[in-house]
Each structure stands twice: as structure tokens, then as C-alpha cells.
Amino acid sequence: MVALGLSSSPHCVLIRPNPPQPQAPPSTSSSNSSNTHCLTRRKAFAFTASVVSSYILDLYQTSSPNSSAAALQVDDELQQEEDRLVQLFQEASPSVVYIKDIELAKGSKDTAVIELADDENAKVEGTGSGFIWDKFGHIVTNYHVVAKLATDQSGRQRCKVFLADAKGNSIAKEGKIIGVDPANDLAVLKVDVEGIELKPVLLGSSRGLRVGQSCFAIGNPYGFENTLTTGVISGLGREIPSPSGGAIRGAIQTDAAINAGNSGGPLIDSDGHVVGVNTATFTRKGSGMSSGVNFAIPVDTVVRTIPYLIVYGTAYKDRY
């Protein structure tokens, strides 16, 4: 008798425990059943593999576009932020000026300061920054930037102001002191703007400032004109020393780099509005470099003080 069976392996195996008998031919139906079962298992395995492969492919095709779209969105946001900062600088920088303190040599003729740029007998004693207050040529800066001119007894001190008109043309003019307030480290210069159109700054408010918000300083550190540095408002309500020996209260602290030559320049917010006047920085002893702890006079103090300096030449509290 012949028997058909399946081994434990996936392959079909014929088992013949007895020799074949002539009167008993093999059963055709049993053989077909075994082959059919083997083929069914192979088809099931192939079908399962196909389903898994299709699932993985669909998962990749579904997630890949989302990942690409997210990456493109991040790149687009970064580009927009960069474009916004570039535009901010382009709109604000024409209102920022570069100031040079110049001392004429003894015996020098009292020539216009514009002619002193290449004069070997003129000594540049310091530089600073400032900004255009109005279309009449009033320039706001720190008192300590122009202190030598304000206290000059020899008649040899001059102040040269480099600025741009509303069309972007560079101009150099002599600056005359209109008013000073050493207690708040503020001063106003006046330049002749006959026939010249200026672009005054946009004034903001320091009242609503918050620690952590972005801010930007524009000035001329070490004589490098129109330099932009970025940072955040690091602290509010600080107290810093003033040139008069007292204290300036309510100062703004920022980590936007402020170095020698930045003094008197504007600290602006993300909308391009002036929120402070860059004034001081703490430096590591002997380094002369900014420590990242920098201060600006709040613009609300500036707005209260400057009109009195323009009209009376001194702060309201010093009038009487």
C-alpha cells in the first residue's frame, strides 16, 4: 500500500513504506490535494510579503512629502526673518550719524571743519555716534561724546558730523552744540541743512519694553561706520553712572554689542523705532572689549529732555 504525507518542512515529500502493488495504482486525488496545499502556502507567503512591501512604500510616500514641506517652511521662515532684518537696517541707518571730535593745532586758522579732514594739523580726539532728531538738523548724542567741545576754553575744539540726506548722499558738516544735559548724558548738536532733506528717526517708547524682546544697535564702533549689532533686552530699570557724577536711573540693559564709537547711537526695536540711546558698557579690566553687559538711556527720558535742550540749551531742572 502506498501512503502520501507531509513532512514538517514546507516542501511536499512522498512516503512509500511498502513496495508498489500491481493491482493497486497510486491515488490521483490524494496527490493533487498535497500539491494544492503546498502551492497555497507559497501563495499566502508571497501575498503577505507583497502587502508588507506595499504598506512600507505607502508609508514612505505619505511621510516624505510632509517632511519636505516642513523643511521648506523652516527655510522660508528663516529667509523672511533675514529679509526683515536687512530691511530694518536699510530704513534706519540713514538716520544715524558719525561724529568726530577734532582739536585744531595751535596757530591753525579757523577754517570750516569740512576742510579739516585731511589737515595734518587737526587731531581726532574721539569718535561717537548720534541720530537725526528732526528735519531742522538737530542731532542727538551722548554728552560724553562732545564733552571736550562743550567745555572747550581754548577755542580749538571742533565737531565734525558725517551724515546722509534722504536720498542717501553722504554729507560732512560742522556740528554746533545747542544744549547739554550731563546728568542724563545727553547733548544736542545742530548742523546746517539748508537745501538738504534729512530723514529723522522714528521714535518709540521704552515704557512697554519686555526682557527677552529683540533689539538692535546701529553705530560706528572703532570708526567702522554703519555697523549693526543684534541682541535682546537683557534687563530693565538699571542704574548707571552719569558724567555729572550722579546716577542715570531706569537704564536699559542689552547684550547687543556696544563698543567705543557706539555711544550716542540708537537702540531700536523690531519695528525700527528708537527705544534708547546707547551709552555705556562694562568692560573686563585691561581688555577694552564689551563684556555683553551694555546700557542705553530709555527713549522716554530722551523725549522729555531733548525739547528743553533745543529751546533753552539746558534741561528743565537746570533752568532755575
Image (cartoon, rainbow, N blue to C red):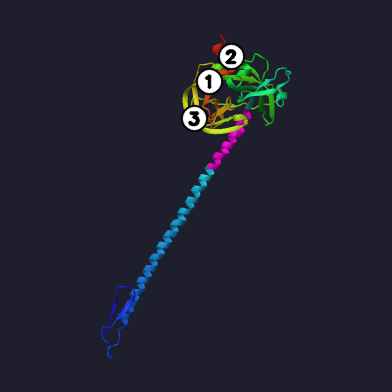
Indicate the amino acid at tag 2: Thr
- Secondary structure under the numbered disc 2 in the rendered image: loop
- To which residue does mark 2 refer? 314
Q: Are marks 3 and 1 in contact (CB under 8 Å)?
A: no
Q: Indicate the quadrant containing the C terminus: top left, top right, bottom left or bottom right.
A: top right
Q: From what the image shows, is residue 119 above or below residue 16? A: above
Whether residue 35 sits left or right of residue 174 in the image: it is left
Q: Main secondary structure of the magenta part?
A: helix
Q: Which mark is residue 233?
A: 3
Q: Say whether residue 193 is visible.
A: no
Q: CA distance from mark 2 to mark 3?
A: 30 Å
Whether residue 184 sits left or right of residue 195 in the image: it is left
Indicate the amino acid at tag 3: Ile
Q: Say whether residue 305 is visible.
A: yes
Foreground tag (3 vs 1): 3
Residue 29: give x, y in percent of width and height. 31, 81
